[in-house]
Amino acid sequence: MSESSGYFVAAGEGFEPQAIAASQWSSDQVVGPALCGLLARELENLHGGGGLVPVRLTVDLFRPARMHRLAVTTRIVREGKRIRLADATVMQDDAPVARAALVFLRPAEQPPGVIWTRDHEPVPPDPGMARPPGDAPLWSSDASGDWSAIPSRHEDSSRKRTWQRPLDVLAGEAGSPFVRAAMVGEQTSMVTNWSDAGVAFINTDLTLALARMPIGPDIGVEADNHLGGNGIAVGSATLFDRHGSFGTGLITAVANAGRRITARRLDEVVGAAERAAAF
């Protein structure tokens, strides 16, 4: 995979999705991480700065974005000394397909006191297992006890986690730490909805809350909880890097069992990508 590869290329005032942006749910649908990354990029580039940092991104994925040109519009909702709110909308064929809201806050001195937190830190894979951007992500589960790029080794009913070095959103443009967190954070749906029979829920949103920006090119997501009933699921996960946990992901999802994604199917995708990279 070329280092200049990205999910989109600039096309006038819009963006053209590349083949790598296609979802596993449909070859004519843009994958969730690409849309989350694009919305994060536009909001950060157009409305970031001034000493405020992005801390909470909420993305609503309410209509499939198809594999052709789209555009993003943004606006400031609130401008204050300690807080800034901005919105963005992905437009395609004169209709909205996704939207996002981003909260910026001004950092301050950390107050004193000891506060309860989760009783263990997620453990990244060995540094020697690092993979280039765009290569198959690493997966792990409590039952398997190891990391590998072969999804079927982890299709079980235990806690899941992933470790990824994402592609750039825009070809030839290195993604910021915030944009990379938005892309990998969308995998909260994968790690929380992956059962011993595959993934049968498709997420309709992502909320990403960040205490700090990720450090380094690789980001992990470890499932914290899955709640389900009546074909609706809620999942939460912890985002981490080699310096510890730095954020939380939250998604809601709807059952999509008729188009369930199995680990065997994902194995085939990984195999095809590796064969293509060999030529």
Image (tube, rainbow, N blue to C red):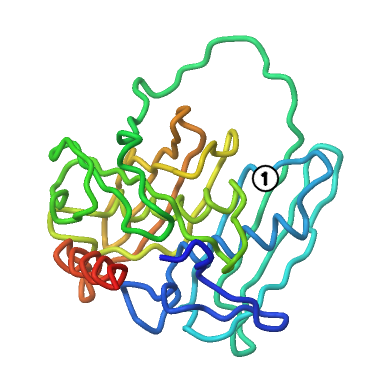
Placement of the N terminus among the 4 image quadrants: bottom left
Q: Position of residue 65 (x, y in %)?
A: 49, 79
The image quarter containing residue 119 is top left
User: In this rendering, would 86 be left or right of 64?
Assistant: right
The answer to whether 217 is drawn above or below residue 74 in the figure is: above
Placement of the C terminus among the 4 image quadrants: bottom left
The answer to whether 118 is drawn above or below residue 175 in the figure is: above
Q: Residue at x 30, y 33 (%)?
A: 126
Q: Residue at x 32, y 60 (%)?
A: 232
For badge 1, the amino acid type reads: Pro
Can you identify the residue that label 1 sits on?
54
Camera-side residue: 205 or 187?
Answer: 187
Answer few, some or many: residues within 10 Å of disc 1's Cα (few below 14, many 20 plus, some between 14 and 19).
Answer: many
Q: Secondary structure at mark 1?
A: strand
Q: Position of residue 23 (x, y in %)?
A: 37, 73
Q: Position of residue 187 (x, y in %)?
A: 39, 54
User: In this rendering, would 13 be left or right of 163?
Assistant: right
The answer to whether 207 is drawn above or below residue 22 in the figure is: above
